[in-house]
Image (cartoon, coloured by chain):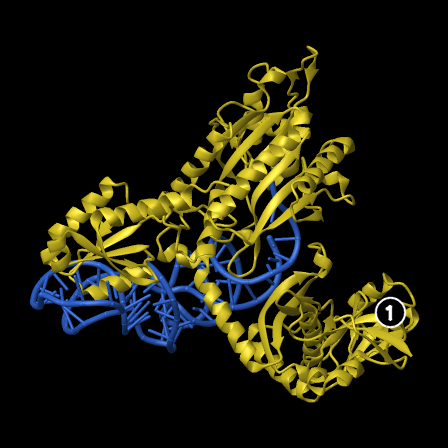
RNA sequence: GCCGAUGUAGCUCAGUGGUAGAGCACUUCCUUGGUAAGGAAGAGGUCACGAGUUCAAUCCUCGUCAUCGGCUCCA
C-alpha cells in the first residue's frame, strides 16, 4: 500500500500501481471524467500512469494551467497524426504546448502546406478525437528509439534522440502516430472537442536561421465548442485594440511608402499625445535632477568605432553618409550614448559633480530587418526618452533605484499593472558577442541583481538578453494580441566609459573611471504610444486625450452658445471642439463615441437659457446637467488627479 | 533576411481575360433635430509598381516594393 496526500492534506491509502485516474474515481466519477493529468510530487504525469511510491497528488483539470498544457500538448500529437495520415511522408520537428494552444514544426517535403489545408486537418483531427484513442506511454532504449526513427527516415527526431540519455527516453503512441515525447498526455483523445488551427508560418529548425526552415502550424483546442467560440470572440476583441487599426481610426500616425517603410509619420493628434507624455516625463526628470542635452542626428564614423557600435552593427546599419571630403563618413545615430559620452568629456569633472544625469529625447535610426517592422512597436526611426547617468561605483545602486522609482511612477500614472521585470544577462555560451572584461560584466550584473533583491522586485533573469556593452533591467508588457515588448530599460555599463576614456577626479586627487547607467522609462515614444493605445483601447486618460471635450449643439440655433462654451473651456486650458455639422444629435453622439472623445457636451435651448451644459461621458452615458464652471472644475480636477500621481 | 499569405476609392471589402462595384467617409442640397447612424444627389480609382504572355491583363507569369502571420534579429 502507498500513501497519497491530496491538496487538502488528507492522506489516503491505495494499492501500489494506482493511477491518478483511479484516485479521482475513488473521489467521484464526475471528477474522473474531467481529469486531464496529475501532478505527482513536482512532476506532471499522465493520469493513467501507475504510481508506486508515497507522494503528494494533485488532479489536474481544464481549470489548471498544467491541465491545459497537457490538453494542448496532446492536441499537437493529434494534429501530427492527422497530418501524417493526410500527407504521408512528412517529417516532424518539435510540437510543444504554448501559452495559448500548441504548434508542430513539420518538414512537408515537396508538398507545400498552406492555410487552405487547415480546414482538412481540423476535420481529420476531430474525426480522430472521436475515436477516443488512448495515449500510451512506452519506455524505450536509445537504440530502439534510433532504430524506429531511422526506419521512419525522420532526421529531426534522430537529432533530438542523439542528445538524450539512454534509459530516460519515452515514446507516446496514439492511434497511428508514435512520437518521441516526454509527456504527459491526456488519457485519450476524446477530451478534445473543439479544434482551431490558427495560423501557419515558417520556423527555423532549432531556432537557427542557418538551418532548414520547417512549416509551423499553430492551433488551439478546447474541451467544449462553446469555449472555442468564446476564445474566437476574444481574439476579435483583441484585434479591435490593435494600435495599427486604432492609430488609423483615431488619426494618430500613418506610414508612407514614399517616405519609407518603418518611418512613422505622426499626425496632429498623435503628436499632441506624444508631446504630452514628453512634457510629463520632462517634469518628472527635472525633479529628479536630470539636465537636458541636445545632440545631432548624425555622428562621425569614428564616434561609433570608439563606442563599439560600428564593429557590432556597422554592416547591418543604414549605409554611411559620405561627404566631398575623401574618407569622411557619418552615420545616422543608432544610439545617443556615444554623443552623451562626448558631452561628459567636454570638461573635467570632480567626484563632487557626480552623479551627472544627461537627458534627451533623442531620435535614432536603425536598419531593422524588413520582416521585423511592426506598426509603431518596431520601426527604423524612433525617439528614445534617453538619459545617461555618469556616477561613481558607489552611487550605482542609489541611482538605479531612483530610475526604478521613475518607471514605477510612470507605469502607475498610466495604469500599467501587468508588466514583467526582466533581468537581461549576457549569454555565457557566446562571450564573443560582448565587449568588456568579465570582471566588469560580473560587477554590473551583480549590481542589478542586488538592486532587484533590495527593492523586492519580482523579476525573471534571462541569459542572452543583455546589450552588447552591459546587462539590463527591462520592463516588458504585452500587446493586445499577447506579443511581448520591452518598454522601460535600465542598463549598467562599465564599458563605454572605458572606451571613451571618461574620468573624474576623486577626493584622492586621482583620476577615476565613472560608471554609466543608460535608461529610458518609456523606451521609445513610438513603442510606448503603441502599447498605451492597446492598453486603453484608444480611450486615453483625460490628461492625454488629444481632444478632451466635444460640444454638440442641438441645432444651428445654438451655435453661438456652443462657441461661448468652447471659449470658456479653452480659457480653462481644456481641449474642446464643436461638432457644427447639420446632423441630428444622435448622429453627433455616435460619431463622438466612435472617436473616443472623453466628454460630450450637448447644448440646446434649455442649456443656453440656464448657462449650463448637458454632459455625456464616453462609453458611460448621460451625467446630467452642469454649470460651465462646475464642468470645468470637474475636468481640471480629474486631469490633476490622473497626471499628478505621487506615491 | 527567411517561410507563407495579401495588395481594388480616404476606410472596410465585393468582382471579372474585353480598361470596375458596394457600404461608410467626402461635397452639395433638403432637413433644425435632445443622448449611438434623417433624406437625396454628386464627386472620387494608372485595380501597389515594373516587365512578360495575349488581339486584349486589374485578373495569367516573373520581378520589385509594401502590409499581415510567424521564424530569426533587436545597440
Is residue A277 left or right of A613 when viewed as pictured?
right
In the rendered picture of this protein, how many numbered marks are placed on residues? Answer: 1
**Residue depicted at 57% across the width and 52% down the height:** A419
Marked residue chain, label 1: A
Question: Is A6 in front, or is A546?
Answer: A6
Residue A271 drawn at (x, y percent): 37, 43
User: Quarter-wise, where is residue A144 in the image?
Assistant: bottom right
**Residue depicted at 15% across the width and 56% down the height:** A607
User: Quarter-wise, where is residue A196 in the image?
Assistant: bottom right
**Residue depicted at 40% across the width and 48% down the height:** A258
User: Chain A shown in which color?
Assistant: yellow
Residue A465 drawn at (x, y percent): 67, 45
**Residue depicted at 90% across the width and 69% down the height:** A142
Q: Residue furthest top?
A: A509
Residue A69 drawn at (x, y percent): 69, 70
Rendered blue, the chain in question is B
Is residue A330 left or right of A620 when viewed as pictured?
right
Is residue A187 left or right of A567 when viewed as pictured?
right
Question: Is A289 in front, or is A172?
Answer: A289
The quarter of the picture where the N terminus of chain A appears is bottom right
Label 1 sits on a secondary structure element that is: strand
Q: Which residue is mark 1?
A: A169
Q: Is residue A522 visible?
A: no
Question: Is A342 in front, or is B55?
Answer: A342
Residue A577 drawn at (x, y percent): 23, 50
Amino acid at each position: 500500500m502507498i500513501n497519497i496526500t491530496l491538496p487538502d492534506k488528507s492522506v489516503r491509502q491505495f494499492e501500489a500501481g494506482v493511477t491518478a485516474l483511479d484516485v479521482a474515481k475513488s473521489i467521484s466519477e464526475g471528477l474522473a471524467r474531467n481529469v486531464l493529468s496529475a501532478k505527482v510530487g513536482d512532476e506532471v504525469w499522465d493520469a493513467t500512469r501507475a504510481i508506486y511510491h508515497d507522494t503528494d497528488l494533485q488532479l489536474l483539470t481544464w481549470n489548471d494551467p498544467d491541465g491545459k498544457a497537457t490538453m494542448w500538448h496532446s492536441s499537437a500529437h493529434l494534429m501530427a497524426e492527422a497530418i501524417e495520415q493526410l500527407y504521408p511522408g512528412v517529417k516532424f520537428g518539435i510540437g510543444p504546448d504554448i501559452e495559448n494552444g500548441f504548434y508542430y514544426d513539420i518538414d512537408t517535403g515537396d508538398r507545400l502546406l498552406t492555410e487552405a489545408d487547415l480546414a482538412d486537418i481540423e476535420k481529420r483531427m476531430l474525426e480522430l478525437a472521436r475515436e477516443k484513442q488512448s495515449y500510451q506511454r512506452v519506455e524505450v532504449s536509445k537504440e530502439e528509439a534510433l532504430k524506429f526513427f531511422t526506419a521512419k527516415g525522420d532526421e529531426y527526431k534522430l537529432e533530438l534522440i542523439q542528445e538524450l540519455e539512454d534509459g530516460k527516453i519515452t515514446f507516446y503512441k496514439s492511434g497511428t502516430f508514435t512520437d518521441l515525447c516526454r509527456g504527459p498526455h491526456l488519457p485519450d483523445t476524446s477530451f478534445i472537442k473543439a479544434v482551431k488551427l490558427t495560423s501557419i508560418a515558417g520556423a527555423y529548425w532549432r531556432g537557427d536561421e542557418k538551418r532548414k526552415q520547417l512549416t509551423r502550424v499553430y492551433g488551439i483546442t478546447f474541451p467544449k465548442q462553446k469555449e472555442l467560440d468564446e476564445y474566437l470572440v476574444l481574439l476579435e476583441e483583441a484585434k479591435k485594440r490593435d494600435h495599427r487599426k486604432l492609430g488609423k481610426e483615431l488619426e494618430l500616425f500613418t506610414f508612407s511608402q514614399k517616405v519609407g517603410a518603418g518611418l512613422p509619420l505622426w499626425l496632429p493628434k498623435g503628436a499632441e499625445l506624444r508631446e504630452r507624455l514628453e512634457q510629463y516625463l520632462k517634469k518628472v526628470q527635472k525633479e529628479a535632477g536630470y539636465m537636458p542635452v541636445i545632440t545631432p542626428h548624425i555622428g562621425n564614423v569614428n564616434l561609433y568605432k570608439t563606442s563599439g557600435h560600428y564593429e557590432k552593427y556597422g554592416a547591418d546599419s543604414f549605409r554611411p553618409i559620405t561627404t566631398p571630403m575623401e574618407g569622411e563618413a557619418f552615420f545616422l545615430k543608432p544610439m545617443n550614448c556615444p554623443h552623451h559620452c562626448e558631452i561628459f568629456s567636454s570638461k573635467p569633472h570632480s567626484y563632487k559633480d557626480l552623479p551627472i544625469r544627461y537627458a534627451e529625447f533623442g531620435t535614432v535610426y536603425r536598419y531593422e530587418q524588413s520582416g521585423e517592422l511592426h506598426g509603431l512597436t518596431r520601426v527604423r526611426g524612433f525617439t528614445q526618452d534617453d538619459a545617461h547617468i555618469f556616477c561613481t561605483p558607489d552611487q550605482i545602486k542609489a541611482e538605479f533605484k531612483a530610475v526604478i522609482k521613475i518607471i514605477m511612477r510612470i507605469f502607475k500614472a498610466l495604469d500599467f499593472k501587468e508588466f514583467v521585470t526582466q533581468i537581461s544577462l549576457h549569454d555565457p555560451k557566446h562571450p564573443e558577442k560582448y565587449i568588456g572584461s568579465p570582471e566588469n560584466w560580473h560587477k554590473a550584473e551583480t549590481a542589478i541583481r542586488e538592486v532587484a533583491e533590495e527593492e523586492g522586485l519580482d523579476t525573471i533573469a534571462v541569459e542572452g538578453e543583455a546589450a552588447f556593452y552591459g546587462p539590463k533591467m527591462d520592463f516588458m508588457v504585452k500587446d493586445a494580441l499577447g506579443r511581448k515588448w520591452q518598454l522601460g530599460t535600465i542598463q549598467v555599463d562599465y564599458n563605454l566609459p572605458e572606451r571613451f576614456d571618461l574620468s573624474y577626479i576623486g577626493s584622492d586627487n586621482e583620476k577615476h573611471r565613472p560608471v554609466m547607467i543608460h535608461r529610458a522609462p518609456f523606451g521609445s515614444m513610438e513603442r510606448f504610444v503603441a502599447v498605451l493605445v492597446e492598453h486603453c483601447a484608444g480611450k486615453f486618460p483625460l490628461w492625454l486625450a488629444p481632444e478632451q471635450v466635444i460640444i454638440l449643439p442641438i441645432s444651428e440655433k445654438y451655435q453661438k452658445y456652443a462657441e461661448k462654451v468652447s471659449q470658456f473651456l479653452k480659457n480653462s486650458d481644456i481641449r474642446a471642439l464643436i461638432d457644427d455639422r447639420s446632423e441630428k444629435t444622435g448622429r453627433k453622439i455616435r460619431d463622438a463615441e466612435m472617436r473616443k472623445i472623453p466628454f460630450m457636451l450637448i447644448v440646446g435651448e434649455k442649456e443656453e437659457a440656464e448657462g449650463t451644459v448637458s454632459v455625456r461621458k464616453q462609453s458611460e452615458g448621460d451625467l446630467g446637467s452642469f454649470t460651465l464652471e462646475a464642468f470645468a472644475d470637474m475636468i481640471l480636477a480629474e486631469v490633476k488627479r490622473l497626471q499628478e500621481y505621487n506615491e
